[in-house]
Amino acid sequence: MFETLQAMPADAILGLIAEHKEDPRPEKIDLGVGVYRNAAGETPVLDVVKEAERRLIDTEDSKAYLGTAGNAGFNAAMQKLTFADAGSEDRLLTVQTPGGSGSLRVAAGLIMRATDNATVWVSDPTWNNHVPLLGGAGLALKPYPYYDTTHHEIRAEAMLETLRALPRGDLVLLHACCHNPSGLDPTEDQWRQITEVVKERELVPFIDMAYQGFATDLDSDAFAVRHMADNVAEMIVSTSCSKNFGLYRERVGTLSFLARDHGTRAILASQASSLARTIYSMPPNHGAAVVSSILCDEPLRARWHEELDTMRDRLRDMRQMLHSALAVKAPDHDFSHLVRATGMFCFLGLTAGQVERLKKDSGVYMVDSSRINVAGITPGNVDYLADSIAAVL
Ligand code: LMR
């Protein structure tokens, strides 16, 4: 029967991993998938994760099922990390999901169960997989203006104007920090304005926070989530531990709801449980147990903060280094947005043709949109990279 199917094109982001791997050129550079790398180009397991894993091996006493909502200790610790004291505890629900993507998928299923006529508005542009993932689950999606590709800044006014015209009950997918792909986030003031519009229009914020700790610090990066939670009637928040704990392949994330009231929270808990059961039954424990033991042990938590700071500082330094190198090698072009962005990503502002030439001529790999993962830059390759970029400008 399967001969009726056709092969799919490679994923726009994941396909680059294989392409880069097959390239024999030693000078090749991978600026594709959003995975942190150190100055040696490696993605080591965090020391604090290794320590938590050692402890887990010694103390874990069962592999019996945990249940559809996952690890309760993890859920409680992650709710605190996400919301701190914002939102009211008896309206907040947090369940463990298989990564941020699993969280988005469960959220999509619950939105579909709750309503059949809401549209989810996504930033233009947004993460490459938001549209296939949420649209594939059956949701109707439309774009709101977000990024000005000419001036490399946020189109805050146009975004607010679009939100002001949305029908009540529509959802707005927002990136809490380190916007993927642009790296540019609203200021706290702009978040306040967005919150006002969401409240006025009775929209439902759906916040994706995959990079908490990668922009400024854990608390500042959660500003949007916490400010909304203190001001809106209901909201959805997806988080991921892939980046800030480096647990990419363990698939650790959460889905949280701020419900209108305690009764709705209970209904959402049972709905989330039944939906998880129909997709993957229950999430895996290992990564969640590791995160939980780090968050619940002060010395481990402090060590995690240090490792997170190191990752964030390196990303900032690499942006600055590329910016300085480009100022010398391509002085007629303005790349100042590189240092205004935060987190893993930013656009170079190249055409798809220039991106293709970078790949062919220099073995430099990035998404077609010219989004780069700055973690792929090192002091050793930055000059070659800047030369390669200058050559295609
Ligand atoms: C990215 O945007 O590169 C990451 O979020 C990884 C992925 O799954 O696409």
Image: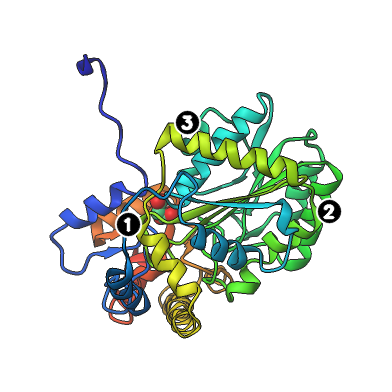
Q: Quickly name the residue at label 3.
A: 136
Q: Residue 274 in the image: x percent, y percent?
A: 52, 34
Secondary-structure class at tag 2: helix
Q: 10 Å neighbourhood of mark 2: few (<14), some, or many (≥20)?
A: some
Relative side of 303 to 268, left or right: left
Q: Which one is earlier in the sequence, the residue at label 2 or at label 3?
A: 3
Q: Residue furthest left?
A: 24
Residue type, label 1: Arg
Q: Is residue 289 above or below residue 97?
A: below
Q: Which residue is mark 1?
A: 249
Which residue is the site of mark 2?
196
Relative to 261, say whether 178 is above or below.
below
The residue lying at 81 percent from left, 41 percent from top is 202
| Residue drawn at x 43%, y 77% as measured from the top left | 311
Occupied quadrant, residue 286: bottom left
Name the quarter where the C terminus is drawn. bottom left
Marks 1 and 2, how far apart at CA: 38 Å
| Ligand 1 within 8 Å, label 3 CB | no
Relative to 3, does residue 255 appear above or below in the rendering? Answer: below
**Residue 225: image location, x then y, percent:** 67, 60
Of labels 1 and 2, earlier in sequence is 2
Tell me whether circle 2 and circle 3 mark residues in contact (CB < 8 Å): no
Percent x, y of residue 192: 79, 61
